[in-house]
Image (cartoon, grey):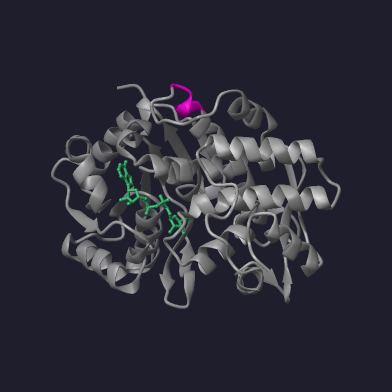
Amino acid sequence: MSEILPSLTVSLGERSYPIFVGPSAASALRARIESLRAKGRRVLVVVDEALALAQGTALDDLFGDLPRALVPSGETSKNFHMLEHVCRAAAQARIDRKGALFAVGGGVTGDLAGFAAASYLRGIPFFQVPTTLLAMVDSSVGGKTGINLPEGKNLVGAFHQPAAVFACTGLLETLPPREFSAGMAEVIKHALIADAELFDLLEKQPLQTPTDPRLPGIVTRNCAIKAAVVQSDEREQAVEGGRALLNLGHTFGHAIEAVAGYGTYLHGEAIGVGLVLAGRLSAALELIDQDTVRRIETVVASANLPTRLRTPLPTDQLWEAMTRDKKVDAGEIRFVVLKDIGSARTTRSIPPPLIHQLWLTTGAHP
Ligand SMILES: NC(=O)c1ccc[n+]([C@@H]2O[C@H](COP(=O)([O-])OP(=O)(O)OC[C@H]3O[C@@H](n4cnc5c(N)ncnc54)[C@H](O)[C@@H]3O)[C@@H](O)[C@H]2O)c1
């Protein structure tokens, strides 16, 4: 059989890996499983429970009788108990250093299974099979893995790049529409930081359903943007720019998630409001004009994402949550701002009264 060419490659020296997107991803995945079997390698398939119900036949078709570990759906599965569950399932499947894990699900399964792969036997290979839009365009690429603590999200983890990513876009057809929209927040973010043409495309014709024929191309484009940023700053160490650019809208969004109570907004929904605020901050710094801010707001709204708080939240609590964000460096919040659509940079020393004013524009109360 002829080799299936990847849609793109993440170039990180000996940690480089291919990403397969769209209809060819399933064939590439089957070929990889066959080759592992032929070499006598043992594997464990870590699967999101709701996905296993929604896509049972497709998963049987892809993974057959390979041993599986089920992960209950939802953010709360990113914990030590589930890490132990996955690692013990790996031990029971007698996975050795030459074996591998497959992470099949959204960002929760990917982060958890990726961290299990990073720590089991001090590190074994793993493959990402993302099944949410967010995981396809964002979390499956870049090698950040981890779990949460009661004290905060993603506080324990490791950088561990996958050996390959297989984004079978057909699996998105059972994704709840609200989750699809949440993934669109990261697509819009990528367009804003690096791809003005993609932004125009979304502006002219919003991407609202997983059956849109443009989807595989748009996923590939997003993976390329994320790959380029990761290649330039794999471990987020750049003093300016680099991987931190991927946080556009996130300092605002994380504050909304924390103050509203985790789970009230999906992450992408909070980022929708955050992207609009990042636009307004950029306009307040005279980097972009008001018309550009309106365009951002329209594209966010067209993805069925909120552009304002659903219910008012107190400005002082939002500010306080921002100062507790992981991205605070030496007591200063590092914001990502837009120089234009498709171009971003990091900035510091934003006066707190300006941030307070910006919150008021989203329906926060003083
Ligand atoms: N590692 C990274 O670089 C990175 C980047 C961004 C986000 N994340 C993490 O990703 C997580 C969020 O990921 P997510 O938005 O994919 O959420 P998720 O994994 O919780 O999945 C969302 C929901 O969709 C369901 N689901 C998944 N695929 C489905 C399908 N095809 N059909 C039907 N239902 C399906 C799941 O059961 C779940 O209920 C967060 O924990 C976040 O911290 C990590």
Residue 72 location, quadrant: bottom left
Q: Main secondary structure of the magenta part?
A: helix
Q: Is residue 293 left or right of residue 221?
A: right
Q: Nearer the viewer, residue 281 or 337?
A: 281
Residue 180 x/y as whole percent? 42, 40
Q: Residue at x 47, y 65 (%)?
A: 158
Q: Residue at x 52, y 43 (%)?
A: 305
- Compared with residue 185, is residue 335 higher up or lower down, i.e. above or below? below
**Which of the image's four quarters has the N terminus?**
top left
Q: Residue at x 73, y 58 (%)?
A: 358
Q: Residue at x 49, y 34 (%)?
A: 219
Residue 156 x/y as whole percent? 46, 72
**Which of the image's four quarters has the C terminus?**
bottom right
Residue 44 x/y as whole percent? 23, 54
Residue 34 on the magenta segment: no
Q: Nearer the viewer, residue 281 or 229?
A: 281
Q: Nearer the viewer, residue 184 or 96?
A: 184
Say whether residue 232 is visible: no
Q: Is residue 260 left or right of residue 329?
A: left
Q: Is residue 306 left or right of residue 22?
A: right
Q: Nearer the viewer, residue 213 or 242?
A: 213
User: What span is in magenta?
Assistant: 213-217
Q: How many discs appear?
A: 0
Residue 186 location, quadrant: top right
Residue 338 x/y as whole percent? 75, 46
